[in-house]
Image (cartoon, rainbow, N blue to C red):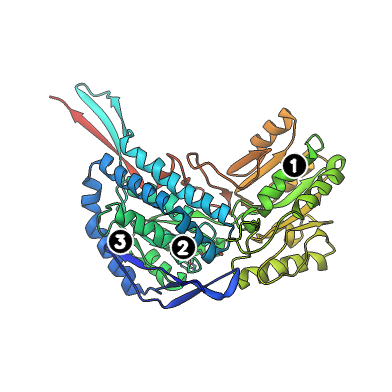
């Protein structure tokens, strides 16, 4: 029996907290993967006080020195990748290849933002006022709160933490309850890299207690959240009531339009990778496909072939190509979405509304109505709903007819379709002949409509805008 990993809070530079809560391995429900503390509002208060005390000195530390700490943390995580990735698989369930890639993403993010220690942080202007120069620079917010989900348990904490820290903020983060260990690894790496005590704090526990206490504390000047739409919109109200900044990345129902001029095999590869990688549990996963009549049969043939090729199982087993669903609650949701589609008249070309333990085989549903729940509601499982459309225009209109707008894709060999789609599709990220999931770390990411707060983008240089405000200084030289 594997010994459980021990997740800890990081508060004021101390790793602490009793092993109160069990997280079982989704591949082996009899195995306790992680034991973690369950934080209180008092612990959040202590963490925020530590952050408030530490932040001014951190912001005054020379920028290259701040960057060097992030780069060192990246190096520590790189050395520990096999252990961190294995712990990630045990708590979240994805395959070891996917987990290793995710740890690599966290490392890349720390390297990207660490390298900004040498970047320019402002501009210099001539002034209309004689003898005067104008400079701009970006100032940190102060103390920021981060609330993160379970599906990328180290990458998302890293891509919120790194831009916050390099910008001179102190951070209080609450990771998802299902995945406390990955965030602990990030905290330990930053701590061991020499981050001053109190600059980065992690408090584990429930959203209702720990998340709520972070969001309500008036010392939190900005909150970045990734998770469900319902929780995000509630947090937005809380933050806006005191005019604090809020950044929300929420649900998606990412569609792909497959048109007659696409290559059928290539289109199926794009849809399978987008729909079934990571067990379909990415906010950017493909979950609805609009297909035109001339390619329908060939495309579905190829898609079913690819869907049948996945080997579900324990993510630590090298032969596994699809890890289990993260939890019984999530599995119930997947099963009931597929059952609902069957009840509504859809047919499954592959997959079923049942599971072996938490292993849920990829589903391809056809004869789906555009307004059926399987085509409109986020599922967060390896389920692709295929909807027939007569032509490109009808497909684009149907794809845009959604409250969500995170990512969207088209499979085509036509430059005209590709460029028209990029112009007119309502999504924050557009993929032409590439899966809707899978993002570069150095370019902006975020959605429109109900997928996002539509304010600040995450990732790349633009990510620092959320964690800073711009100051303009006029200097008279005589
Ligand atoms: P998911 O469906 O991805 O689990 P949630 O929105 O439930 O999405 O969770 C995302 C994050 O938000 C988690 O860290 C969770 O604990 C936290 N959370 C849930 N409810 C609240 C709340 N009422 N206030 C603050 N944070 C919350």
- Closest to the camera, between mark 1 and mark 2, is 1
Residue 433, x across and y down, in percent: 69, 38
Left or right of residue 449: residue 128: left
- Dot 1 or dot 2, earlier in sequence: 2
Callout 2: SS: helix
Q: Which residue is mark 1?
A: 267
- What residue is shown at x 57% (from left), y 52% (from top)? 97
- What residue is shown at x 21% (from left), y 51% (from top)? 57
Where 312 falls versus 208 (above or below)?
above
Residue 149, x across and y down, in percent: 50, 61
Give the quadrant of residue 68. top left
Q: Which residue is mark 3?
A: 219
Callout 3: SS: loop
Quote the CA–CA distance across marks 2 and 3: 15 Å
Where 61 falls versus 308 (above or below)?
above
The C terminus is located in which quarter?
A: top left
- Closest to the camera, between mark 1 and mark 3, is 1
Residue 47, x across and y down, in percent: 30, 65
Pointers 2 and 3 in contact (C-beta within 8 Å)? no
Q: Which residue is mark 2?
A: 235
Say if residue 447 shows up in the picture. Answer: yes
Callout 1: SS: helix
Does any atom of ligand 1 lie closer than 8 Å to the CB of label 3?
no
Give the quadrant of residue 420. top right
Nearer the observer, 66 or 431 = 66
Does any atom of ligand 1 lie closer than 8 Å to the CB of label 2?
yes
């Amino acid at each position: 029996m594997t010994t459980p990993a021990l997740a800890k809070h990081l508060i004021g530079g101390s790793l602490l907290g009793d092993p109160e809560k069990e997280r079982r391995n989704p591949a082996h429900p009899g195995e306790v993967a992680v034991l973690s503390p369950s934080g209180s509002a008092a612990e959040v208060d202590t963490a925020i006080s530590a952050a408030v005390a530490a932040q001014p000195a951190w912001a005054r530390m020379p920028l290259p020195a701040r960057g060097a700490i992030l780069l060192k943390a990246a190096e520590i995580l790189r050395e520990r990748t096999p252990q961190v990735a294995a712990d990630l698989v045990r708590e979240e369930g994805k395959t070891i290849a996917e987990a290793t890639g995710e740890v690599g993403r966290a490392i890349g993010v720390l390297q990207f933002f660490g390298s900004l220690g040498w970047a320019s942080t402002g501009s210099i202007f001539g002034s209309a006022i004689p003898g005067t120069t104008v400079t701009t620079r970006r100032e940190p917010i102060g103390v920021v709160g981060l609330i993160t989900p379970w599906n990328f348990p180290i990458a998302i904490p890293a891509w919120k933490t790194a831009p916050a820290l390099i910008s001179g903020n102190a951070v209080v983060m609450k990771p998802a309850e299902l995945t406390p260990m990955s965030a602990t690894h990030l905290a330990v790496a930053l701590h061991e890299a020499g981050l001053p005590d109190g600059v980065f704090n992690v408090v584990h526990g429930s959203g209702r207690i720990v998340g709520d206490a972070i969001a309500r504390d008036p010392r939190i000047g900005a909150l970045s959240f990734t998770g469900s739409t319902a929780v995000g919109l509630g947090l937005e109200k809380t933050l806006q009531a005191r005019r604090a900044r809020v950044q929300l990345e929420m649900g998606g129902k990412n569609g792909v339009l497959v048109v007659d001029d696409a290559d059928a095999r290539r289109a199926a590869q794009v849809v399978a990778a987008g729909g079934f990688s990571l067990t379909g549990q990415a906010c950017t996963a493909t979950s609805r496909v609009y297909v035109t009549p001339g390619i329908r049969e060939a495309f579905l043939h190829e898609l079913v072939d690819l869907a049948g090729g996945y080997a579900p199982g324990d993510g630590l087993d090298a032969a596994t190509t699809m890890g289990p669903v993260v939890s019984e609650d999530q599995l119930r949701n997947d099963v009931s979405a597929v059952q609902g589609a069957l009840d509504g008249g859809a047919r499954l070309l592959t997959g079923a509304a049942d599971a072996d333990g938490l292993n849920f085989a990829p589903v391809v549903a056809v004869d789906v109505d555009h307004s059926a729940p399987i085509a409109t509601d986020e599922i967060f499982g390896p389920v692709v709903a295929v909807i027939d459309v007569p032509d490109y225009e009808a497909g684009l209109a149907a794809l845009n007819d959604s409250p969500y707008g995170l990512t969207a894709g088209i499979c085509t060999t036509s430059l005209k379709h590709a460029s028209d789609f990029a112009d007119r599709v309502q999504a924050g990220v557009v993929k032409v002949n590439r899966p809707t999931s899978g993002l570069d770390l150095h370019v902006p990411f975020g959605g429109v409509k109900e997928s996002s707060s539509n304010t600040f983008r995450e990732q790349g240089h633009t990510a620092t805008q959320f964690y800073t405000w711009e100051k303009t200084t006029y200097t008279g030289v005589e």
